[in-house]
Image (tube, rainbow, N blue to C red):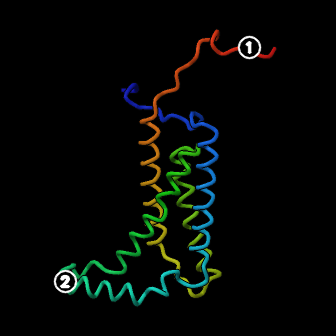
Amino acid sequence: MGGMVQRIPRTSALRPRMRRALAAVAALYLVGVALVVLWPSPVDRPEAGTIRAVFLWLHAHGLPRWLGYAQLEWTSNVVFFVPFGLFAVLLGVRPWGALLAGVAASAAAETAQALFLPERTASLMDILANSLGTLVGVVAAVLVLRRQPAPVPQPASDRGPTAS
């Protein structure tokens, strides 16, 4: 049975240019996350009336009443953290480490909101949603990496001269 476990390829197979580009996009993503979670007021506040109006219209046209703003917000939190898990694993963090980092980042964000941002509402449900998003990203990255062809080792004679 031990032979059935497939080892996840490490990201060292990524070309340096691709790895740098991925790291740059991940850094931009993290800046965006920091801006959203540490914004003094809820980021959706300016659009709250529009969102409510859209849901009223959708409910009037057949959308079930149980599906509303709370579900949209929760789903948004899940989707918001998918890149966290994806980038972490693609940049070389082990899957379990990426998941733990996502949970810790989410808990830190919610703690910061509770302690320092009186207009924000810290929520255990947000931590759960963000953690689920991280997990989805981790799984997606693992699947992507498993589809990568294994690097073909070069014979010693093809490697060129080595320094002694």
> Measured from the top left, where is residue 118 in percent x and y?
60, 87
Residue sitting at x 49%, y 62%: 81
User: Quick one: quadrant of the C terminus?
Assistant: top right
To which quarter of the image does residue 116 belong?
Answer: bottom right
Reply above or below: 133 against 40: above
138 sits left or right of 158 in the view: left
User: Element under label 1?
Assistant: loop
93 sits left or right of 125 in the view: right
- Please report whichever mark, 2 or 1, sits nearer to the chain's N-terminal start: 2
Residue sitting at x 46%, y 34%: 148
Residue placed most toward the observer, 93 or 151: 151
> Measured from the top left, where is residue 126 in percent x and y?
47, 71
* Amino acid type shown at disc 1: Pro
Q: Residue furthest top?
A: 157
Residue 161 disc label: 1
> Measured from the top left, where is residue 152 in percent x and y?
52, 21
* Amino acid type shown at disc 2: His
To which quarter of the image does residue 101 belong?
Answer: bottom right
31 sits left or right of 142 in the view: right
Q: CA distance from mark 2 to mark 1?
A: 72 Å
Residue sitting at x 51%, y 46%: 95
Mark 2 crowdedness (10 Å alpha carbons): few <14, some 14-19, many ≥20: few
Residue placed most toward the observer, 143 or 5: 143
Residue placed most toward the observer, 95 or 14: 14
Which residue position holds label 2? 61
To which quarter of the image does residue 1 belong?
Answer: top left
User: Element under label 2?
Assistant: loop
Reply above or below: 155 against 1: above
> Measured from the top left, where is residue 31 in percent x and y?
63, 65
Mark 1 crowdedness (10 Å alpha carbons): few <14, some 14-19, many ≥20: few
